[in-house]
Image (cartoon, rainbow, N blue to C red):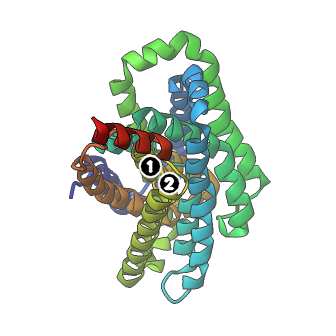
Amino acid sequence: MPVDPYILLLLGTVGLAALLPARGTAADVASGASTAAIAFLFFLYGARLSTREALEGLKHWRLHVTVLACTFVVFPLLGLAARGLVPALLTQPLYTGLLFLTLVPSTIQSSIAFTSIARGNVPAAICAGSFSSLAGIVVTPLLAAALLGHSGGGFSADSLVRIVLQLLVPFLAGQVLRRWIGGFVMRHKRVLGLVDRGSILLVVYTAFSEGMVQGIWHQVSAVRLAGLLVVEAVLLAVMLALTWYGGKALGFGREDRIAIQFAGSKKSLASGLPMASVLFGAHASLAVLPLMLFHQMQLMVCAVIAKRRARDPEQPAVTPEPAAGIRTAVGTATRSG
């Protein structure tokens, strides 16, 4: 069961924030740097996404609609259903984080990687993940406004404005400038990938530093964390089953069902953390904890599933069965011959 090294870095960043949280002037500097990093992160997202490829991907619209429905309809409905677990299993802050997790868009990189390992429809996974991330910039804040309300750490119309300024505007700027900088971004995507991850680590440090200063960690016990893990395991199992068997019920082939399962059952840490920082402010540390745990869980489980799918026998080509009249004629000719 693989452990993503980046998760270890995230946990190390949380530990650093617990031991040496940013306070006073340092907190202001970290907050400003985090805001700039978030804007730059979404600028790079915009510069990477090929508009032409996205439009080409629309041809497989049934698959993309299915993935979007899983991400932004089925997941939130399950999140709302989990409200009945408060306060018996989850505290209200942990439930808020769990509900926010269900509103976040799907991943791109891991969906593509697992689809490729399992011999699924990789181009569909690329487009599905890209469409989900693009839609999430708008849909996630709107869903948060509708479903989280005041429980979202002071969520208001001002939060929507900040989302637009910090996420959507930089993304659109990246799309506009992609004509001139897209080639540079793609040639140096390894280095810029480090910038991506470094930006997210800075967001995590800022969020958890604010949480330490506010003393909100006293609200979480080991029993509550164990309960959260159980709830997330059930959530992931339900989504993996729905995406796989639901894809079969909708008439998709094996390769498409693999893409649907891996793109429709995941949630993006890279997109969710910056959004949580904007939406929840000082309460972001508890809000992103369910997302961080779910992210590692989905990687571990989907890695096992992808390897098992890769061992599936090759699907034989389906030859249309001849009509009854033809079968009779062939059988008669064979007997007479």
Q: Residue at x 31, y 44 (%)?
A: 315
- Disc 1 marks which residue? 257
Which mark sits nearer the N-terminus, 2 or 1? 2
The image shows residue 303 at horizontal and vertical percentages of: 28, 52
Q: Residue 166: x, y in percent?
A: 64, 38
Q: Residue furthest top?
A: 180
User: Can residue 209 be seen by looking at this rendering?
Assistant: no
Cα–Cα span, label 2 and label 1: 5 Å
Residue at screen point 46% across, 61% down: 245
Closer to us: 180 or 305 = 305
The reply, left or right, for residue 23 in relation to residue 169 is left
Q: Is residue 166 above or below residue 57?
A: below
Residue lying furthest bottom in this view?
88
Residue at position x 35%, y 33% in the image:
194
Residue 198 lies, in percent from the top left, at: 38, 38
**In the structure shown, which secondary structural element does the residue marked by tag 2 occupy?**
helix
Looking at the rendered image, the quarter that the C terminus falls into is top left
Query: Which residue occupies the foreground of this view, 302 or 4?
Result: 302
Corner quadrant of residue 99: bottom right
Q: Position of residue 105 (x, y in %)?
A: 55, 49
Name which quarter of the figure residue 319 lies in. top left
Give the residue type that dot 1 points to: Arg
- Residue position marked by numbered label 2 in the rendering: 247
Task: In this rendered view, identify the residue nearer to me: 152 or 142.
Answer: 142
Outermost residue on the right side: it is 157
Q: Say left or right for 293 vs 118.
A: right
Say few, some or many: other residues with alpha carbon within 10 Å of mark 2 (under 14 / 14 to 19 / 20 or more). many
Q: Nearer the viewer, residue 265 or 208?
A: 265
Does residue 260 show up? Answer: yes
Image marks 2 and 1: residues in contact by CB distance under 8 Å: yes
Q: Quadrant of residue 284?
A: bottom right
